[in-house]
């Protein structure tokens, strides 16, 4: 079936191309991982965002779950040692940026960065089973509660205060909560997730359109005018997938809100001529930035999986969601068409041509997650088909038995 074929290609790309290349060429001699690899396969030595190493820990762990036979514990150790050493902030979390010589250029703490540290720790625990990793993640959560708690709801971006406030770091806190609810034991993760979902419902959504807004003032009011005129299709898709996961884990109903996000993103945020999710639309749903980065394409695929699961078997909605998954995968494959297997294009111009630039390591996280979700969806679909085939066979056998027991009428 097409879904299984796409899943196999995605899995093979992660396992056979991306993970081996980024392990072989993406390690930084100073610890952790590089920020970018050129399309010629040569890694760049440059100022790095510390969170990139956290995202690489996550990506290598997911690659191992998909079947990568490389040294996953060494890969995770490479990242975690850097995050606990050179990349560590004096506050207890991770810094924001580090120079080539190891000098901390921005100590943070930044909410977005701490979210990815906690996410990396969750995937490391999934692989190793080490309960000390949850204790470390909870200390990071303590740091966020202590230093970044907003006086009314949610969290600040940084200290000293940095405006505007953004929905996006909170989205990744929901991702963290879901990840740790799957592998951890602390009830605090459920509380964190519930808080973020409430923020999404009550603060981040545009009450007039149902879209998710991106930026807010210090009191969580949407920024007026051009400053607040931003809706990102990639984030609408990403929230859709996360709210689907949250409902499945928590039982809290989120389908109506999530499906509206997906509807807006599909209808207004996908350029059908190029078959790509664009970078930004306005609150009036008109396209503002028709460029298309790689990562929104992965989130479009994941949202399609969520919408497929929510749709009734055999329904038009399910068929549409399956078509959306395959369209998103077709778009992704264009970004993977490069001379050095395992790298990718990052940005597509409005005219459909790609920007010639190095591949950013941070996107590996998006590709790995999408491949894992696609693989799981294909396995579930195959199991459902087998179950259906088995049920049909059993029904046929029961019918044959009934018919054999019926009296024969002789004319």
Image (cartoon, rainbow, N blue to C red):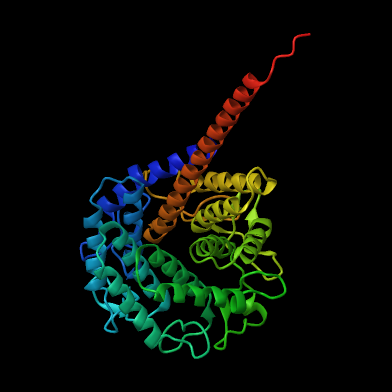
Of 87 and 195, nearer the camera is: 195
For this orientation, the residue located farthest to the right is 411
Percent position of residue 5, x then y: 48, 37
Percent position of residue 349, x then y: 56, 55
Of 155 and 278, nearer the camera is: 155
Percent position of residue 255, x then y: 61, 62
Depicted 58 relative to depicted 226: above or below: above
- The residue at 34%/45% (across/down) is 15
Q: In the figure, is residue 11 to the left or right of 95? A: right
Percent position of residue 264, x then y: 67, 61
- The residue at 50%/74% (across/down) is 194
Q: In the figure, is residue 164 to the left or right of 260? A: left
Of 301 and 309, nearer the camera is: 309
Q: In the figure, is residue 50 to the left or right of 357? A: left
- The residue at 40%/53% (across/down) is 368
Depicted 335 relative to depicted 204: above or below: above
- The residue at 26%/76% (across/down) is 88
Residue 395 visible in the current orientation: yes
The quadrant of the rendering that contains the C terminus is: top right
Q: How many marks?
A: 0
Residue 95 visible in the current orientation: no
């Amino acid at each position: 079936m097409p879904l299984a074929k796409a899943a196999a290609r995605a899995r093979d790309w992660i396992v056979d191309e991306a993970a081996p290349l980024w392990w072989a060429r993406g390690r930084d001699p100073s610890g952790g991982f590089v920020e970018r690899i050129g399309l010629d396969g040569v890694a760049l030595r440059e100022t790095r965002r510390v969170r990139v190493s956290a995202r690489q820990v996550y990506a290598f762990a997911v690659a191992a779950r998909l079947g990568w036979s490389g040294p996953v514990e060494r890969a995770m150790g490479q990242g975690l040692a850097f995050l606990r050493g050179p990349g560590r902030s004096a506050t207890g979390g991770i810094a924001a940026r580090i120079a080539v010589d190891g000098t901390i250029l921005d100590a943070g703490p930044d909410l977005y960065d701490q979210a990815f540290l906690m996410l990396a720790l969750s995937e490391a625990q999934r692989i190793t089973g080490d309960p000390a990793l949850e204790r470390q993640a909870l200390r990071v959560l303590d740091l966020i509660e202590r230093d970044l708690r907003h006086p009314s709801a949610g969290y600040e971006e940084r200290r000293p205060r940095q405006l505007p406030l953004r929905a996006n770091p909170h989205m990744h806190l929901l991702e963290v909560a879901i990840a740790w609810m799957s592998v951890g034991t602390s009830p605090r993760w459920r509380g964190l997730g519930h808080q973020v979902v409430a923020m999404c419902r009550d603060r981040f959504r545009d009450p007039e359109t149902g879209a998710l807004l991106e930026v807010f003032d210090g009191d969580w009011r949407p920024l007026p005018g051009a400053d607040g005129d931003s809706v990102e299709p990639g984030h609408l898709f990403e929230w859709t997938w996360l709210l689907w996961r949250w409902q499945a884990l928590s039982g809290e109903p989120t389908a109506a809100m999530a499906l509206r996000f997906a509807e807006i993103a599909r209808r207004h945020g996908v350029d059908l001529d190029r078959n790509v999710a664009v970078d930004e639309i306005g609150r009036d749903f008109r396209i503002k930035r028709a460029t298309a980065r790689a990562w929104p394409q992965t989130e479009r695929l994941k949202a399609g999986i969520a919408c497929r699961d929510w749709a009734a078997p055999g329904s038009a909605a399910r068929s549409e969601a399956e078509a959306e998954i395959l369209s998103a995968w077709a778009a992704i494959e264009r970004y993977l068409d490069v001379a050095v297997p395992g790298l990718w294009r990052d940005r597509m111009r409005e005219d459909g041509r790609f920007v010639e630039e190095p591949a950013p390591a941070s996107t590996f996280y998006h590709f790995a997650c999408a491949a894992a979700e696609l693989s799981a969806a294909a396995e579930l679909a195959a199991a459902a088909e087998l179950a259906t085939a088995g049920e049909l066979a059993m029904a046929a056998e029961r019918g044959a038995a009934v018919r054999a027991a019926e009296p024969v009428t002789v004319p």
